[in-house]
Structure formats: structure tokens, C-alpha cells
Image (cartoon, grey):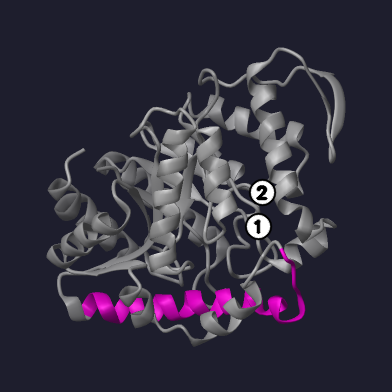
């Protein structure tokens, strides 16, 4: 079983300075690489304490590439709707070269109204923009010269530089939460998926993963080669009480910043984001224990987390958990303790 770590900045300046947070992440990434974690991922968000200190995953992962040697570097996820595909494709290709072929390219639609407002993009166009851009980027990575006349972008005779290291191209992932169309699109195209149990309905999400695996097979892709990555919060300590106490503090801060970012949904709507307006009240009402009970977090001692992992495997089948360990203003010591305990006492119970 493979495991990764997932950097999602969600904290206040009262918790940490931004340079200190970046350095914390880089130290954790370097140690995770040495401990044998499989992947290191970061998000793209802007304008809020929720994620906004990671507006460009390629920049951050380039720094990670210089501090690591083995771990896969995942954009989790870049947002094609906000970028020209030739520019984004070039950024990703550059990262693939800097990491000597360790890039996994994850793409998503975005969901925060403020981001669409600032970038001048209609939320109703997020899916067609994403799908058109991914198709263009794949061509730019694999063809010597590309001419494209699409709905959103047009250009002629473009040779992307630099060329990607991985052939035919880096693995592609799609961020999917609760919309069946995203799971089906990923499966038909042979793309991997990234899911977030905390944000989706557990029972519904299980069925969507089953749909993804079924459509993958029906589309002619080799059964068993599909990959599902699950973003999970994680907080560990030598006692259950200590782990729960730390998790409660940092998760409350995460929820606080998340709620602030999604408040715009109270005055926004889109038929392509069904149910998102209701999400606001749900997030505001969430408590740290709710996240654990919904199966969105691994919290406790090594033995407890091993049991939680086994329960998760029963829900979704074979997956790669991607752990958020330093959100919400977690200190260096708290984050490193979780990383070390998971790497040395949990991972050995799940040999790859």
C-alpha cells in the first residue's frame, strides 16, 4: 500500500508566518522522502487563508523536487480554467524535468466563487474549460507541433518547450468530490482520481468510486491499473487523548478558514455545482469529531490509525491515502511527530 502527504495551507498569520510554513513543508517533504512515502501533493487556491498560500503548485513542487529524490510530485490540483493550456502545459513540463520524471499532473474544476470572479471565468464553463485544456495539454506533451481551434483557446503550429521527461506523458489525475460526471470522465479517459471523503457523502462517494472502476473496465483500460488517491487529515501521538487534543485545535482552524472561503455560495449558484450552496451551512456546523466519524481523518495512536486504515480499505478498495498533517497551524513538532509515527509504525503494517 502506498502513502503520500498533502500540503494544504489553511491557517492564520497568528498561527505561523508564510515563509515559516513553506520551510515546515519542505522539511516534512524531505523527511517523508527518506521514510519512503510515495507522493507529495499540494493544492491550487487563491485569495483566502483557506489554501491561498498555494496559488501555484508548480513553484512549490519545484522546491520540493530539489529536496527529494524518490517521491512522486502531484499537483492536487491545478485549475485549467484559470490558465492558458500552453502556459500550464509548459509549467508542468518544466516541473517534470526538474524532478527528472517524477510529476503526476492533477487537474480540477475549482469551486470557490471568488476565484472565478477575479479571473473573469464563468463557473458554468469550468468543466468544458477543464476538459478542453487537458486534451490540449496532452497533445502539447506528445506531438511535435499542435494546432488547436477550440471553444476557449485557439493557436497554430506550437511546439511546447521543454518536452516532458515521461513518455508518452506524466500520469494524469482528476479531482472529484460528488459529481458523477467527473468520475465517468476520468474513467473513460484512463485518468486516475483524487477524492476527499471529508467533503463528500460517505455512502455516495463509495458508489461513485465503484462507478469509476466499472467505467474504467468498460472503456477498455486494463483492470486494476486505475489509481484512487484519498485525501485524509491525520494527527498522531503516543496517546489517544493527546492526538485528539491536537487534532481538535488544528481542525477547528481549518474548518474556520474553509467556512470563510465558501460563504460566497450564499449569494452564488450554478447548475453545474448542485448542492454547493447547502454546503456552507454544513461546513459551518462541522466539528472535529464529525470529521473523524465520517471517515475523513486518521487520529490516534499507531494501533488506532492502523485499524482506521483497514476500515477505509473496506469502503473504497485499494487506494493511496494522501495525508494532511500540518494544516490549521500545526507546529513543527506536531507535524513531524505525525509524519514519523505514521512512517515508522503504521506504514510497515501495509507493505507495498
Residue 281 lies in the magenta-colored region: no
- Locate the C terminus by quadrant: top left
The residue shown at (22%, 50%) is 343
User: Residue at 75% across / 17% down in the picture?
Assistant: 159
62 versus 298 height, above or below: above
Residue 53: x, y in percent? 61, 60
Q: Circle 1 sits in a helix, a strand or a loop, which is it? A: loop
Q: Residues within 10 Å of mark 2 (few under 14, many from 20)?
A: many
Query: Do labels 1 and 2 touch, CB within 8 Å?
Result: yes
Looking at this view, is 164 or 200 the one in front? 200
Horizontal side of residue 84 vs 341, given as left or right = right
**Marked residue nearer the N-terminal end (1 or 2):** 2
Q: What's drawn in magenta, residue-wise?
A: 242-271
**Distance between mark 1 and mark 2 Cα atoms:** 6 Å
- Confirm whether residue 277 shows in the render: yes
x and y percentages locating residue 8 in the rendered image: 50, 60
Q: Is residue 159 left or right of residue 338?
A: right
Residue where numbered disc 2 is placed: 79
64 relative to 240 in the view: left or right: right
**Is residue 265 highlighted in magenta?**
yes
Residue 143 drawn at (x, y percent): 68, 15
Can you name the residue that lies furthest to the top here?
144
The residue carrying mark 1 is 110
Amino acid at each position: 500500500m502506498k502513502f503520500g502527504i498533502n500540503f494544504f495551507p489553511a491557517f492564520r498569520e497568528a498561527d505561523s508566518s508564510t515563509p515559516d510554513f513553506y520551510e515546515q513543508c519542505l522539511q516534512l517533504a524531505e523527511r517523508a522522502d527518506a521514510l519512503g512515502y510515495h507522493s507529495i501533493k499540494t493544492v491550487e487556491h487563491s485569495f483566502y487563508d483557506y489554501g491561498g498560500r498555494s496559488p501555484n503548485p508548480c513553484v512549490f513542487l519545484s522546491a520540493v523536487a530539489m529536496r527529494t529524490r524518490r517521491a512522486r510530485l502531484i499537483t492536487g490540483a491545478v485549475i485549467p480554467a484559470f490558465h492558458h493550456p500552453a502556459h500550464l502545459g509548459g509549467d508542468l513540463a518544466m516541473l517534470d524535468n526538474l524532478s527528472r520524471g517524477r510529476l503526476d499532473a492533477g487537474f480540477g474544476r475549482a469551486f470557490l466563487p471568488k476565484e472565478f470572479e477575479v479571473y473573469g471565468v464563468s463557473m458554468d464553463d469550468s468543466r468544458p474549460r477543464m476538459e478542453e485544456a487537458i486534451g490540449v495539454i496532452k497533445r502539447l506533451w506528445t506531438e511535435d507541433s499542435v494546432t488547436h481551434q477550440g471553444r476557449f483557446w485557439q493557436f497554430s503550429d506550437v511546439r511546447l518547450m521543454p518536452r516532458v521527461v515521461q513518455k508518452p506523458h506524466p500520469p494524469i489525475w482528476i479531482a472529484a468530490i460528488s459529481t458523477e460526471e467527473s468520475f465517468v470522465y476520468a474513467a473513460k479517459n484512463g485518468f486516475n482520481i483524487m477524492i476527499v471523503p471529508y467533503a463528500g457523502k460517505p455512502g455516495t462517494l463509495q458508489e461513485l468510486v465503484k462507478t469509476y472502476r466499472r467505467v474504467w473496465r468498460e472503456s477498455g483500460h486494463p483492470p486494476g491499473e486505475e489509481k484512487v488517491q484519498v485525501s485524509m487529515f491525520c494527527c498522531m501521538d503516543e496517546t489517544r487523548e493527546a492526538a485528539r487534543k491536537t487534532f481538535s485545535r488544528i481542525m477547528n482552524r481549518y474548518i474556520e478558514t474553509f467556512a470563510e472561503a465558501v460563504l460566497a455560495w450564499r449569494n452564488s449558484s450554478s447548475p453545474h455545482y448542485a448542492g454547493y450552496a447547502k454546503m456552507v451551512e454544513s461546513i459551518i456546523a462541522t466539528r472535529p469529531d464529525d470529521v473523524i466519524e465520517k471517515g475523513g481523518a486518521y487520529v490516534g495512536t499507531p494501533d488506532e490509525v492502523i485499524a482506521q486504515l483497514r476500515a477505509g480499505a473496506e469502503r473504497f478498495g485499494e487506494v493511496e491515502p494522501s495525508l494532511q498533517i500540518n494544516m490549521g497551524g500545526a507546529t513543527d513538532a506536531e507535524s513531524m511527530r505525525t509524519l514519523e509515527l505514521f512512517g515508522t509504525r503504521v506504514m510497515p503494517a501495509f507493505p507495498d
